[in-house]
Structures are given as C-alpha cells and as structure tokens.
Image (cartoon, rainbow, N blue to C red):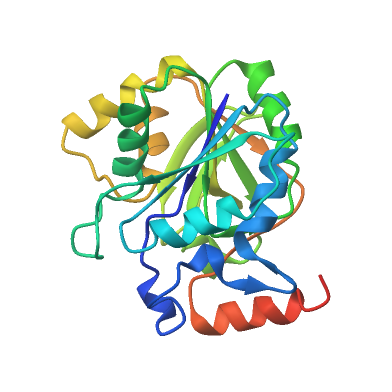
C-alpha cells in the first residue's frame, strides 16, 4: 500500500506564516505539524512508501525534512514536485492525486491524507474497516455544531457504514457526520479518478471525488472516535499551538 500525502497548497489564509514555509512544516509544540501525521502513517505496517506531493516553491524544504529523518526501518518517503509555483496555477488536490498516480505508475491500494490536518482517530482501525468492506472508505466524525458542519462534507450513513448521501458544505446538514481528509481506495478505484476529471469535475478539494463516487458504487464511512483539526487561519494555528505547547 502507498500513502499519498497532499502538501502542494499555498495556505494563503495563513500569510505571513506560510509565505516562505509550507503549513505542514510549521512548528507545533516541540515538533512539526507533519511529524504528527507521519506517526499515524507509520502505524500502518502495510504501507511501504509515503509519497508527499508538493509544489516547486516548497519541494526543497520538504526534501530537507525527509532527509533529516531516520527511516531505516520504516516506509520510504518520496517527495514529488508537481511543478506549480503559485496559487494561480496549482493543480488542486485531485489533480495532484492523479499526478502522483501517473508519475509513479501506481497500481496499488492507497491511503490519501491531507498534509496539514492533525487528527487523533486511529488510522489502523480505519484500515481494518476498509479491508473488511473491500470498498472505498472515508472517515466520519460526529460533529454536533451546525456551524462547523457547514464547513465540511456531511454524510448520511446507514447502520452498515454505507454512505447514502454526501453534500459538501451544506447550509442544512442532514446528519452530524462530518467527513475529514483521510481516504482509503483500492487499486481498482484509481482509474476512476481519470473518469471523474474527464467529465470536467473540479480538481480541487479531495472530498469532491467520493461525493461523485458514492452515486456509482457503494462506499463506506468509518465512524471514528477522536478529532481532527484543519489549521486554516493564523488565529486557528496559534490556538492549536497553545493546545500542543507541552506535546
């Protein structure tokens, strides 16, 4: 299995913090944001390679980070430059997923994660659920606050975990299940990304692809215990730093 870590954004809402540094490499406590995500990826023993896709502006910084790690007994890290250099010519998250698959000729199951989301749910439990269902699997977290759900993809999920409906940023959420940016896809699903893009669908937010996919085949949501923080603003970053100051 391959892990694809999405880190090609420019995080303009965090300027000036991210003007010359990618969000994933910002400090959080005594570590970096990306280090916490890497811990979770490393817990999945079937992952044999981690592909971090980034842009031309930040590729050297990510490569220096990867080179500083001792990975002798862990999955290798490949830093892949998508060739973009600004928010104006970015490929978008789904565009970057396709770029990774095509560039490295991937024919394997994948787990796709945002490179800037701090989460506490157990990705190994989610992986076990994915293997049990043998179908595309998303992660869902119970979010009681309506104003938070309005910022997320929200899913209706049956008792078996199958997604019956999924809407991006709904004004009137149909459930409390918010979908976050961790996705398990079997290798048979990867060619459908080409089909999705060929239809002219948005290459941006990674949640757009499963929103399209659930109408074509059964996909499932793992109802996770835990939380996920998407650090989207300067204020949000500093409040998260405060929470992790002793980490």
The image shows residue 152, relative to residue 241, as above or below, that is: above
Task: Please identify the quadrant where the N terminus is shown.
Answer: top right
Residue 225 placement, left or right of 8: right
The C terminus: image quadrant: bottom right
Quick one: 51 or 11, which is closer to the camera? 51
Viewer-nearest residue: 219 or 65: 65
Query: What is the x, y in percent for residue 91?
Result: 25, 49
Residue in view at x 31 percent, y 34 percent = 98
Residue drawn at x 42%, y 28% as measured from the top left: 214
Name the residue at the right extreme.
246
What is the quadrant of residue 243 in the picture?
bottom right
Which is more toward the observer, 186 or 33?
33
| Rendered location of residue 178, percent (x, y) | 57, 51
Is residue 170 at all visible to an observer of this figure? no
Q: Is residue 64 left or right of residue 84?
A: right
Q: Is residue 156 above or below residue 91?
A: above
Q: Position of residue 119 (x, y in %)?
A: 68, 55
Count of numbered circles in the view: 0
Q: State the residue at coordinates (66%, 51%).
A: 69
The image shows residue 47, relative to residue 71, as above or below, that is above
Residue 148, given in percent of the width and then of the height, sits at 55, 66
**Res 22 seen here:** yes
Horizontally, residue 190 falls left or right of residue 239, namely left
């Amino acid at each position: 299995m391959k892990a694809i870590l999405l880190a090609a954004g420019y995080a303009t809402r965090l300027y000036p913090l991210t003007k010359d540094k990618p969000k994933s490499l910002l400090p959080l406590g005594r570590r970096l944001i990306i280090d916490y995500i890497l811990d979770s990826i490393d817990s999945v023993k079937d992952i044999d390679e981690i592909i971090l896709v980034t842009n031309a502006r930040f590729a050297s910084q990510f490569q220096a980070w990867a080179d500083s790690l001792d990975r002798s007994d862990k999955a290798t890290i490949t830093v892949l430059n998508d060739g973009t250099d600004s928010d104006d010519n970015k490929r978008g998250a789904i565009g970057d997923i396709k770029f990774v698959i095509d560039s490295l000729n991937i024919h394997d199951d994948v787990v796709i994660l945002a490179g800037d989301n701090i989460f506490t749910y157990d990705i190994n439990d989610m992986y076990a659920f994915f293997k049990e269902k043998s179908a595309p699997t998303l992660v869902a977290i119970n979010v009681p606050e309506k104003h938070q759900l309005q910022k997320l993809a929200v899913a209706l999920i049956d008792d078996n975990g199958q997604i019956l409906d999924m809407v991006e940023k709904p004004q009137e959420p149909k459930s409390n299940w918010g979908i976050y940016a961790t996705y398990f896809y079997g290798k048979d699903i990867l060619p459908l990304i080409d089909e999705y893009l060929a239809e002219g669908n948005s290459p941006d937010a990674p949640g757009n692809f499963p929103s399209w996919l659930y109408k074509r085949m059964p996909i499932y949501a793992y109802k996770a215990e835990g939380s996920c923080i998407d650090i989207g603003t300067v204020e949000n970053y500093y409040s998260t730093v405060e929470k992790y100051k002793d980490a």
